[in-house]
Image (tube, rainbow, N blue to C red):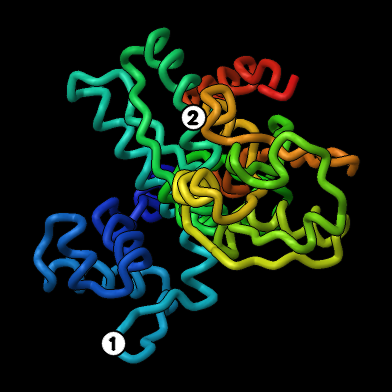
Amino acid sequence: MNDKIGHKSNRLRLTLKQLEVFVATAHDGSTRSAAERVSRSQSAASSALVELESLLGVALFDRVGRRLVLNENGRSFFPKAASIVEASGELEHLFQGQHAAPLRVAASMTIGEHILPLMLARWIESHPDSPVQLQIANTGGVLRAVAAFDADIGFIEGPQSHADLAMREWMRDEMVIVASPTHPLAGRTATRSDLRRARWALRERGSGTREAADRWLLAQLGQVQVDFELGTPEAIKALVAAGVALSFLSRHSVFTSLARGELSEVRTGLPSAARQLTVVTHRERKLGAGCEAFLSHCFAGMGPTHAE
């Protein structure tokens, strides 16, 4: 009898509805937006949040202007709450005619546009019931997506650190200087003085490609004349092909343009430039079997780089 009473008194009081509203509010910064995200009325969402904070005995948000911002308690509570909500969503998929919830992958632009597509195609061929949702952003955007549990796995360019994220080395990527075939430096070996005098088009700050460019160019040349900063490799390649400037890009992103003669690689006597591509996951989140299988697929499918 006592065992039954004790068991009853220790029953779970938190509900998935409360956790779902909490996670949505943390993402959107208001109960109104959270209510829309979870398909509830604003009054129901607000009540669920009040009930959750009352059960926990602590406030989870601070009000900053018109926004709700996670406080120290909320930041501590968020990772496990988000994992529970996500796992519950995966359970629902088991009874909706799907074998697995979509894998949510975030990748920086070079990886997302030039490396992952073939790997994704091969994954779908062998795992037709395990779809993948791919979002492409710069490195900072990928880190934010994984940290906020908006992505299960991230792929980024270059070394990074984040208190909430675990980094795993993936593959090496060669960086090359490219020009228009009509550029004066095309087809010849450029000196340091040539490169310092040239005009350059580089990625925007915050991208992994720009960080790699800044590190290598500063180490080898001291300074360069950056006249253009663009948000995508494709925009840079178009500008470079027009003969306006040089650029410093991943060989993966310029491989086809070089093969077609749209761009020309600028030779130098300088040390080669390479960077480490990295896989990012959340420290507080245990990856499911599908995510682990996809990671194994990506590591097995690395193969040689174009440079090799």
Q: Going from the N terminus, do you reach mark 1 or mark 2 first?
A: 1
- Crowding at mark 2 (Cα within 10 Å: few <14, some 14-19, many 20+): few
Residue at the extreme left of the image, as rendered: 41
Q: Quadrant of the C terminus?
A: top right
Q: Is residue 205 visible?
A: yes
Is the residue 249 above or below the residue 100 in the image?
Answer: below
At horizontal 65% and vertical 42% (from top left) the residue drawn is 178
Classify residue 218 by image quadrant.
bottom right
Residue 297 at x, y percent in the picture: 56, 18
Closer to the camera, 206 or 66?
206
| Labelled disc at residue 288 | 2
Q: Is residue 6 visible?
A: no
- Which kind of residue does numbered mark 1 sit on? Arg
Q: CA distance from mark 1 to mark 2?
A: 36 Å
Q: Which numbered disc, 1 or 2, marks the residue closer to the eye?
A: 1
Q: Quadrant of the N terminus?
A: top left
Residue at the extreme bottom of the image, as rendered: 65
Closer to the camera, 2 or 22?
22
| Left or right: 42 as drawn, with respect to 107 | left
| Left or right: 248 as drawn, with respect to 119 | right
- The mark tally for this picture is 2
| Left or right: 46 as drawn, with respect to 7 | left
At horizontal 46% and vertical 44% (from top left) the residue drawn is 234
| Left or right: 35 as drawn, with respect to 142 | left
| Labelled disc at residue 66 | 1
Is the residue 192 above or below the residue 168 in the image?
Answer: below
At horizontal 49% and vertical 29% (from top left) the residue drawn is 288
> Could you tell me which secondary element the residue under label 2 belongs to?
loop
